[in-house]
Image (cartoon, helix red, strand yellow):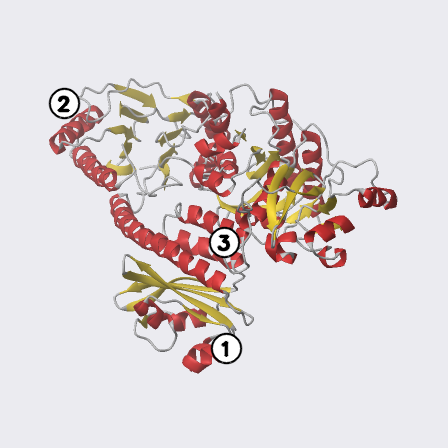
């Protein structure tokens, strides 16, 4: 039953999206940017929501329409560094926050086990115990983004109806605030931090008594803020740690104490911050002193108790999370690497790889510039760049693999990365390369898959930089991940371009101009996947005053579906232009499909329109019925008696339906991708479209067809292909 809470919200469990509180300060316009005039509206709304829901942390993600990503605008309860890998989330990625926006529903993840089942990639990079809710931010005409809330591990796995209501109401309130405050806000480069701690009894009072109390205890005590910095330390704790209080204050323990610079130490801190669980571990202070650290977190910080831990009787000191500073990468970088590896596995095309490297790898390693190139016919073709002007990129594009202008060719040929800490170091070996740009340090990483060079990744820096052994090892490992992703993406793009070209070549290039009839049509591929499919449409002029409109859907989203779509469309075209009646067009096409011996099924709707007589004759093979609106009459769905899908039976008999078409009649033909919205009833969706068709009867068909698609898919992330034809009759010109 817990899994149900992860994948869907129980019908009826969500109350109407009705605000339960009004955050102070509404009225200031949201103008966008990191410090825009209305930033306080979102900040206060998030802080208020975290307090009212009892959450330990929260964030507001805003939808960036041009890039189809969700950007973290405001954060509460966790440090930016912890949330940094998730500050930008592609809308197509399998994550709770993107699912909430893409499917317009509340997503609840009640436990770590639930996260592992439903979102394994997220679970791999967030291996902590907590509960999570993600809810879309609904606006009047769009989804603004999503609200993210997290609770400590002590929270029950299941959310009550009341709790769901609080979350969805808070999200609706934030969406309404965004509606009311002007232009769409811009996602800042770095999320703003707001605090919402519950006040402690002694907040604002003189702290000397508490400090004296702590000083008198024989054990050590120190306090960390949520960023991991030491804000208070007793003399006993400083002595046990082997340092002075003045040197510790303001530092992170694993940075100021080399013997605590171990991956597990920072991991324990992250566990306390995210899960709000008490954490205990033992560390060895050289040479042989074992110390026990007990962490007690809340929304304001972490209290740490330090005591002596006895050694196991008769045994040597047990291995502890201790290492020399150069033994391995810091845990923050290790988590970045794990996160990037998971993200790389989800990239699809070359553009996805480039965007991921630019958006996540550059900040993770402090780089300012990127050039990603692929080996192609003996040359390095630039597939993406960041931080370089177009003229520089143009100069670097197409260099031969044996170029001596930059180290890229040598690096790719040898398979050995090259690191240059300064311009002087670069100029000694490659004098021209140092003058190409104003960069001051570079890392050239060969991209090699199974011994085969696929490209080169160049990270550059605006200031001189010494690359430690840790960084070189991690960057070299990262190059292997990029190489695998780039090679896979290039293969995908090649197949996609072939299939997409095939599909576009088979769809009509333009619509005919027919007196007495206004026509609009759309084909939209699925938002996730190959971006191709078997949906098709066509409008044929049979003779003067007679038109045929056909729409269909071939099963599948691959090259085979696109190819079969072309064959079916060609067969329909041939039979229709030969003068066959609507039912015969489908019956004869069905026989063609049987001769092809395809395993794929096809739905199809054929409409024969006689403009002179004002009549339409329709025949359907398992296809959704069209929408109809006549002036002065209520809209609705045409009642059809459909035949089976094409390809099911050998001899197909198709009933026909006749319609009267007065001037101003609007007929909408569509595929099921328009109406099959996850979590919504198809009949209700179709009825809503019919009402919208009538309301837009005065609009231009080109405007109305887009409005109909947006009505069911406001965020644009439709899960299936959509094909649609809009036909509106007008008065025929005099002969």
Relative to 376, say whether 226 is above or below.
above
Residue 650 disc label? 2
Q: Nearer the viewer, residue 131 or 160?
A: 131
Determine whether the residue tagged by mark 1 lies in a helix, strand or loop.
Answer: helix
N-term-proximal mark, 2 vs 1? 1
For label 2, count other residues whose C-alpha is less than 10 Å away and answer few (under 14), some (14-19) or many (20+). some
N-term-proximal mark, 3 vs 1? 3
Which numbered disc, 2 or 3, marks the residue closer to the eye?
3
Residue 314 disc label? none
Determine whether the residue tagged by mark 2 lies in a helix, strand or loop.
Answer: loop
Dot 3 and dot 1 residues touching (CB under 8 Å):
no
Relative to 392, say whether 314 is above or below.
above
Determine whether the residue tagged by mark 3 lies in a helix, strand or loop.
Answer: helix
Residue appearing at x 28%, y 24% in the figure: 618
Which numbered disc, 3 or 1, marks the residue closer to the eye?
1
Which numbered disc, 2 or 1, marks the residue closer to the eye?
1
Dot 2 and dot 3 residues touching (CB under 8 Å):
no
Any part of residue 67 in sight:
yes
* Pointer 1 residue: 423
Q: Position of residue 692 (x, y in %)?
A: 49, 29
Residue 360 disc label? 3
C-alpha gap between disc 2 and disc 3: 55 Å
Q: Nearer the viewer, residue 248 or 123?
A: 248
Q: Position of residue 702 (x, y in %)?
A: 43, 41
N-term-proximal mark, 2 vs 3? 3
Q: Position of residue 492 (x, y in %)?
A: 30, 49
Q: For residue 136, which quarter of the picture? A: top right
User: In screen coordinates, is 32 left or right of 359?
Assistant: right
């Amino acid at each position: 039953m817990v899994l149900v809470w992860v994948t869907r919200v129980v019908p009826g469990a969500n109350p109407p999206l009705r605000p339960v509180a009004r955050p102070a300060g509404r009225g200031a316009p949201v103008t966008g940017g990191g410090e825009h005039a209305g930033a306080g509206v979102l900040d206060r709304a998030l802080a208020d929501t975290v307090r009212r829901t009892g959450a330990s942390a929260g964030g507001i993600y805003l939808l960036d329409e041009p890039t189809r990503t969700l950007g973290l605008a405001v954060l509460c309860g966790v440090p930016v560094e912890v949330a940094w890998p998730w500050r930008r989330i592609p809308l197509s990625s399998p994550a709770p926050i993107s699912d909430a926006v893409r499917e317009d529903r509340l997503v609840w993840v009640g436990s770590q086990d639930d996260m592992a089942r439903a979102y394994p990639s997220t679970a791999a990079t967030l291996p902590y115990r907590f509960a999570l809710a993600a809810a879309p931010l609904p606006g009047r005409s769009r989804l603004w983004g999503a609200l993210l809330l997290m609770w400590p591990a002590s929270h029950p796995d299941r959310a009550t109806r009341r709790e769901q209501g609080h979350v969805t109401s808070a999200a609706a309130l934030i969406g309404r605030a965004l509606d009311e405050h002007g232009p769409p806000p811009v996602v800042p480069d770095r999320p703003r931090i707001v605090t919402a701690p519950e006040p402690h009894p002694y907040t604002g009072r003189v702290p000397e008594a508490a400090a004296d109390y702590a000083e008198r205890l024989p054990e050590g005590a120190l306090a960390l803020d949520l960023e991991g910095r030491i804000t208070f330390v007793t003399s006993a704790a400083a002595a046990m740690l082997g340092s002075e209080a003045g040197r510790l204050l303001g530092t992170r323990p694993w940075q100021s104490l080399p013997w605590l610079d171990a991956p597990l130490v920072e991991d324990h801190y992250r566990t306390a911050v995210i899960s709000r669980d008490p954490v205990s571990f033992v560390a060895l202070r050289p040479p042989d002193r074992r110390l026990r650290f007990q962490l007690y977190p809340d929304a304001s910080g972490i209290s740490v108790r330090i005591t002596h831990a006895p050694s196991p009787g008769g045994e040597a000191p047990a291995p502890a999370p201790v290492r020399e500073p150069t033994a391995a990468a810091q845990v923050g970088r290790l988590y970045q690497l794990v996160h990037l590896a998971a993200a790389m596995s989800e990239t699809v095309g070359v553009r996805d790889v480039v965007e991921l490297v630019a958006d996540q790898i550059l900040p993770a390693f402090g780089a300012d510039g990127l050039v990603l190139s692929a080996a192609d016919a003996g040359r390095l073709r630039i597939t993406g760049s960041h931080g370089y002007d177009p003229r520089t990129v143009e100069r670097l594009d197409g260099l031969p693999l044996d170029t001596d202008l930059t180290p890229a060719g040598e690096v790719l040929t040898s398979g050995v990365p090259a690191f240059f800490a300064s311009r002087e170091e670069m100029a000694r070996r490659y004098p021209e390369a140092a003058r190409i740009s104003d960069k001051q340090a570079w890392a050239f990483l060969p991209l090699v898959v199974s011994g085969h060079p696929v490209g080169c990744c160049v990270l550059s820096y605006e200031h001189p930089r010494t690359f430690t052994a840790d960084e070189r090892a991690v960057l070299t490992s990262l190059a292997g991940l990029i190489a695998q992703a780039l090679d896979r993406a290039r293969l995908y793009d090649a197949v996609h371009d072939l299939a997409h070209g095939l599909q576009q070549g088979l769809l009509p290039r333009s619509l005919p101009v027919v007196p007495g009839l206004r026509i609009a049509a759309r084909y939209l591929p699925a938002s996730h996947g190959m971006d191709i499919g078997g949906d098709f449409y066509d409008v044929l002029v049979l003779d003067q005053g007679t038109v045929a409109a056909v729409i269909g859907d071939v099963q599948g989203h691959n090259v085979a579906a696109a190819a079969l779509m072309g064959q079916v469309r060609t067969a329909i075209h041939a039979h229709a232009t030969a003068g066959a009646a609507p039912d015969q067009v489908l019956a004869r096409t069905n026989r063609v499909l049987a001769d092809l011996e395809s395993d794929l099924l096809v739905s199809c709707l054929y409409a024969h329109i006689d403009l002179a007589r004002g009549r339409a004759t329709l025949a359907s093979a398992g296809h959704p019925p069209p929408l109809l609106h006549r002036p002065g009459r209520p809209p609705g769905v045409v009642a059809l008696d459909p035949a089976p899908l094409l390809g099911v039976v050998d001899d197909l008999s198709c009933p026909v339906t006749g319609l009267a078409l007065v001037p101003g009649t609007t007929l909408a033909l569509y595929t099921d991708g328009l109406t099959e919205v996850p979590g919504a009833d198809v009949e209700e969706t179709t009825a809503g479209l019919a009402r919208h068709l009538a309301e837009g009867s005065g609009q231009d068909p080109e405007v109305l067809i887009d409005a109909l698609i947006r009505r069911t898919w406001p965020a644009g992330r439709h899960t299936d292909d959509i094909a649609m034809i809009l036909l509106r009759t007008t008065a025929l010109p005099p002969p």
